[in-house]
Image: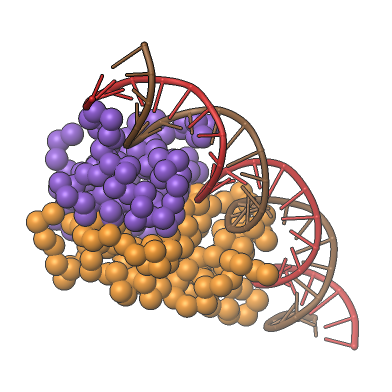
Chain colours: A orange, B purple, C red, D brown
Amino acid sequence: MESMVAVPKSLPLLDAACCPPLVRAPLDADTAAELAHAFKAIADPARLRLLSMVAAHDGGEACVCDLTEPLGLSQPTVSHHLKVLVDAGLLTRDRRGIWSYYALVPGALDALAAVLGSSAAPAGVARSTG
Amino acid sequence: MESMVAVPKSLPLLDAACCPPLVRAPLDADTAAELAHAFKAIADPARLRLLSMVAAHDGGEACVCDLTEPLGLSQPTVSHHLKVLVDAGLLTRDRRGIWSYYALVPGALDALAAVLGSSAAPAGVARSTG
DNA sequence: GTGAGGCATCGACATCCGTCTATGAGAGGT
DNA sequence: ACCTCTCATAGACGGATGTCGATGCCTCAC
């Protein structure tokens, strides 16, 4: 059983947790599990580099062939990491011809940042005297 | 678990990466590894709950005895997770009497959030002189 | 139709990680 | 001095994770 593919949904937890950072109130077990799942997606050197490489690439998108060499990992491994990021709702996949172009999901990283930061939240998020 | 002694200090990587989020330029392997190490610390349900419970606790600090029961994990496991968070520079430990009080490191989570947020780098994260 | 190129999936392997029980180290009270 | 209480550490175990090579699928060119 592919235990890791059990996340077809995007990031509902971020919608629910966009405003109250985890420093405001204790997290329940379920919310913590979903948040941890999202953070696990970015808690890997290869995936962090993939995110930054995709974001910094020309046009804001990149195909696997653009990422394999600079990352120094095999093509299947890169595809695996990209799949994890897509499943986590952080990347989108757009297949054009024989190439798969990956791009950042706008606001996804910001949503994660909003959970962590009490003051680094995007505009509009209330900021209390914490 | 001392084999991961690569991060004995606070979060130097965050000082270096506070301004340029990962979406600005591709991360080098070394920076990515350090960032991943920091995110791994919070990429766990138990540790996320610990962070929130400590932050929301009376006085902004809590001892192990306050955290074990609501977390539903054994005391050694809780101590293990707290150690990971302390090693990651996210918590401080203050031993008073027979109790160990843990508290959030101010700005630590904000620094991590700043790495993620692209447009969430607003009028500058308040970085008190540390 | 046939071949070639790019990518996803499969299966396997080594390692890491979270959890437990058992035990050791300090501090405080009687 | 002794006991109790709190916490940290040690050792062990099962499951999750990152990586690879091999293979299959799909698209395009000829």
Point out the image quarter for the C terminus of chain A.
bottom left
Q: Nearer the viewer, residue A96 or C9?
A: C9
Q: Is residue B4 above or below residue A104?
A: above
Q: Is residue C21 left or right of residue B10?
A: right
Point out the image quarter for the N terminus of chain A.
bottom right
Residue drawn 43% across and 63% down?
A33
The quadrant in which residue B94 appears is top left
How far across and how far down the image is residue A107, in percent?
A: 33, 70
Residue drawn 18% across and 34% down?
B130
Residue A2 visible to the viewer = yes
How far across and how far down the image is residue B46, in percent?
A: 41, 54
Residue drawn 29% across and 47% down?
B66
Task: Please give the count of numbered marks on the rendered protein.
Answer: 0
Q: Nearer the viewer, residue A102 or A36?
A: A36
The quadrant in which residue A116 appears is bottom left
Q: Nearer the viewer, residue A8 or B92?
A: B92
Q: Is residue B120 above or below residue A73?
A: below
The single residue placed furthest to the left in the displayed view is A129
Residue B42 visible to the viewer = no
Residue drawn 21% across and 60% down?
A24
How far across and how far down the image is residue A59, in percent?
A: 43, 69
How far across and how far down the image is residue B11, in percent?
A: 33, 38
Q: Is residue B27 left or right of residue A3?
A: left
